[in-house]
């Protein structure tokens, strides 16, 4: 069983930056694909960015050039650096790990507002 714990969300002004972190329990992090999803009120949960165990990355078109996903396998931690934040980035952000099944964190709120 894998547990994922996110941190780093909060309130930020448009144009600002935040860095989200997700730490995984256990010893399987380094061999898993991991990523970030987000869900705004009344909308479905959508992919933001993901990174394979080999370091290949994939981004939603809406965040390309602004967000960067990375991982530190020694720390069992996934990151999402978010720059040039926009009000439409406001959502609950979820960490995801895929290893035979999907694992999800509890989510962290990101609010972009002046």
Image (cartoon, rainbow, N blue to C red):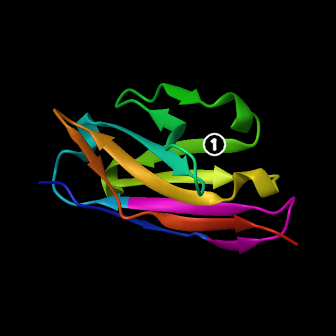
- Residue 41 location (% of width, % of height): 59, 57
| Residue at position x 27%, y 41% in the image | 30
- Residue 53 location (% of width, % of height): 34, 31
Nearest the camera: 95 or 87?
Answer: 87
| Residue at position x 80%, y 57% in the image | 87
Residue 85 visible here: no
Q: Is residue 105 above or below residue 71?
A: below
| Residue at position x 24%, y 35% in the image | 31
Nearest the camera: 30 or 108?
Answer: 108
| Residue at position x 72%, y 35% in the image | 62
- Residue 4 location (% of width, % of height): 30, 60
Q: Is residue 67 above or below residue 107?
A: above
Classed neighbour count for the residue bearing mark 1: other residues with Cα under 10 Å, few (<14), some (14–19), many (≥20): some
Residue 113, quarter of picture = bottom right
Nearest the camera: 59 or 111?
Answer: 111
Q: Secondary structure at mark 1?
A: strand
Q: Is residue 114 left or right of residue 3?
A: right
What is the magenta range? 10-22
Magenta stretch encompasses residue 93: no
Position of the N terminus, as image quadrant, is bottom left
Q: Is residue 81 left or right of residue 1?
A: right
């Amino acid at each position: 069983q894998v547990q994922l714990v996110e941190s780093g969300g909060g309130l930020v002004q448009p144009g600002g930056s935040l860095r989200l972190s997700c730490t995984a329990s256990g010893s399987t992090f380094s061999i898993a694909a991991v990523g970030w999803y987000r869900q705004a009120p009344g909308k479905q949960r959508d992919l933001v960015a993901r990174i394979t165990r080999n370091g290949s990355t994939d981004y939603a078109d809406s965040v390309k050039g602004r967000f960067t996903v990375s991982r530190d396998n020694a720390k069992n931690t996934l990151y999402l650096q978010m720059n040039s934040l926009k009000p439409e980035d406001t959502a609950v952000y979820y960490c995801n790990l895929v290893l035979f099944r999907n694992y999800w964190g509890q989510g962290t709120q990101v609010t972009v507002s002046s």
